[in-house]
Amino acid sequence: GSRFDDTVALPIDAPGRLEAVAAAASMRLRALPEPHELGERTIRYRDRLQHVLRDAAAATARLAAGTYGACLDCAEPISLALLTQRPWAPRCVYCALDI
């Protein structure tokens, strides 16, 4: 049997949270110096921001397609707790940890 029930619960504010995450990441990216002026830590920070921005855009697309909240690997529901904490999460905890 499935390790999940069949009910998919989504954070009510998911669209707004995704928009806010994308806006904050974009603002922080614009505030960074030119790439040739960045130190190693700042380059890693920029890379994380770009990753979050891509993930938020992909989650917004899944929301529009009606697939938001389903794990990209196993198609089982992503927990409400995880989506509340990281609304851009593309995978359930089990697949993210490769359990």
Image (cartoon, rainbow, N blue to C red):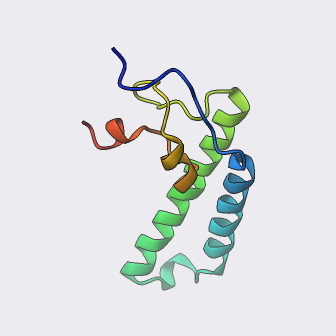
User: Residue, x 75% and y 53% (percent of image)?
Assistant: 16
**Residue 64 location in percent, x, y?**
73, 33
Q: Quadrant of the C terminus?
A: top left
Measuring from the top left, give residue 25's x and y in whole percent. 62, 66
Query: Does residue 6 lie above or below 97 as drawn?
Result: above
Q: On the rendered structure, is 20 left or right of 99?
A: right
Q: Position of residue 72 (x, y in %)?
A: 47, 30
92 or 32, which is in the foreground?
92
Q: Residue furthest top?
A: 1
Image-quadrant location for residue 44: bottom left
Q: Quadrant of the N terminus?
A: top left
Q: Decide which of 20, 82 is in the foreground and name it.
A: 82
Q: Is residue 23 above or below residue 6?
A: below
Residue 60 against residue 54 in the figure, above or below: above
Above or below for 25 versus 3:
below
Looking at the image, which residue is at 61% across and 42% down?
A: 59
**Figure disc tally:** 0
Q: In this view, does 65 lie to the left or right of 87?
A: right
Would you say 63 lies left or right of 78 here? right
> Can you name the residue that lies furthest to the left here?
99
Front-lying residue, 45 or 5: 5
Task: Give the residue drawn at x 68%, y 47%.
Answer: 14
Q: Position of residue 68 (x, y in %)?
A: 61, 34
Say which of 58 and 78 sits in front. 78
* Residue at point 57%, 80% (across, down): 34
Tell me the quarter of the picture where residue 26 sits: bottom right
